[in-house]
Image (spheres, grey):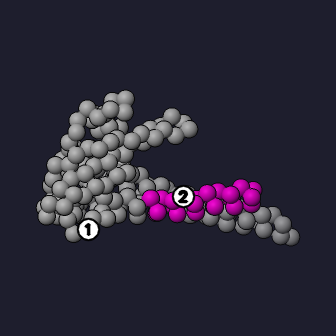
Amino acid sequence: MQLLFGNFRWIAVLGVIIGALGAYFFWEEQQRIAHIQANGVEAQAALIQILQQTDSKGRASFWAEVSWRDAKGAIRKQDRIPVSGAFARNVSKDGRLLRRETRIKYLPDQPEVRVLLLEDGMHNSTQTPVMLWVSIGIALFSAFGWGHMLRHERRWLAKQAAAKAPA
């Protein structure tokens, strides 16, 4: 029984850590999106390509590569911008682009910050808050499970000690 409590405890600790890290990263992403939406400059960007990668389980991930002229007239380019499957299917088919342009928002004074593809709004605005709350839920559920296990372990140890004690 002691081994069982120990294993569950470490699983719960791992859940708390993963949930907390996930919540932090999704919160950061949500803050980035809000900052770009509030302070970004809108521009028309050329779609250079949509890349697709399929993992061993058949799940596809999509990325876009875009190029645009900033407010000063300089040509800027970003690649490996994550996009939703719906957006990728809307602008490309069988590796060919169906559209050559899309609207973006970027931060002119921070070229290292990834741009927002405005037409991929579902991917930018709804997925992040949902995943933030899922991560918080995982952390809270794991913390509750950890505390619950500790309480039951102490009770079990007390019963074991009482059973071994001479009457």
| Res. 73 image quadrant | bottom left
Q: Residues within 10 Å of mark 1 (few under 14, many from 20)?
A: few
Amino acid at the residue labelled 1: Gln
Q: Is residue 145 magenta?
A: no
Q: In this orientation, does residue 166 appear?
A: yes
Q: Which residue lies most toward the front here?
A: 74
Q: Residue at x 48, y 38 (%)?
A: 54
Q: Residue at x 73, y 65 (%)?
A: 157
The magenta-colored residue range is 1-22
The quadrant of the picture occupied by the C terminus is: bottom right
Q: In this orientation, does residue 148 appear?
A: no
Q: Residues within 10 Å of mark 2 (few under 14, many from 20)?
A: many
Identify residue for label 2: 15
Identify residue for label 1: 110
C-alpha separation, residue under disc 1 versus residue under disc 2: 35 Å
Q: Give the x, y percent position of residue 49.
A: 32, 42
User: Which mark is in front, 1 or 2?
Assistant: 1
In-front residue for pair 95/132: 95
The quadrant of the picture occupied by the N terminus is: bottom right
- Of helix, strand and loop, which one carries label 2? helix
